[in-house]
Amino acid sequence: RKTIWTRIGLSTLTFVLWHPVNAWAFNPGARELFYDPVFLLIVAALGVTCGYAYVVSRSLWSAVLIHWATVVLWVLGLGGRNLVLS
C-alpha cells in the first residue's frame, strides 16, 4: 500500500513539474499560469486523481480520459485557452 502511494506521489510530482518546464521550453504564453502555485496545486490534485484511477483500473486509459476531460472542460467551458494565450 505504501509503495502504491509512493508511486502515485512520484508520478504526481513529475506531472506537476512538467507544467512549468513545458511553459519555459515550449509555451511561453502559459508561463504566468503554469508558474502559479494555485494552478500547480490543482494540477497536483489532478495528478493524484489520475494516478489513483490508474491503480484502481489497471489501465492508463482511465487516467488519459480523466486528464483529457479536465483539459477540455477547462479550455472550452472555463476559458482556459484565453488564460494561456493572453
Image (cartoon, rainbow, N blue to C red):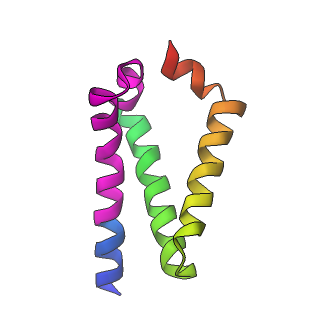
Q: Is residue 44 above or below residue 24?
A: below
Q: Is residue 4 above or below residue 14?
A: below
How far from the left and from the top, in percent, is residue 44? 40, 52
How far from the left and from the top, in percent, is residue 71? 59, 42
Q: Residue at x 54, y 71 (%)?
A: 53
- Residue 73 figure quarter: top right
Q: Which one is nearer the viewer's eye here, 20 or 45? A: 20
Hey, which residue is sitting farthest right in the picture?
77
- How many numbered discs, if any? 0
Q: Quadrant of the N terminus?
A: bottom left
Q: Which one is nearer the viewer's eye here, 5 or 20? A: 20
Q: Say if the magenta span includes residue 13.
A: yes
Q: Is residue 57 above or below residue 21?
A: below
Q: Residue at x 27, y 27 (%)?
A: 24
- Residue 17 figure quarter: top left
Q: Main secondary structure of the magenta part?
A: helix
Q: Say if the magenta span includes residue 65.
A: no
| Horizontal arrangement in the rendering, residue 18 relative to residue 52 (left or right) | left
Q: Residue at x 28, y 64 (%)?
A: 10
Q: Is residue 79 above or below residue 70?
A: above
Hey, which residue is sitting farthest front in the picture?
26
Looking at the rendering, the stretch of residues picked out in magenta corresponds to 10-35
How far from the left and from the top, in percent, is residue 67? 56, 53
| Horizontal arrangement in the rendering, residue 70 relative to residue 45 (left or right) | right
How far from the left and from the top, in percent, is residue 19? 35, 39
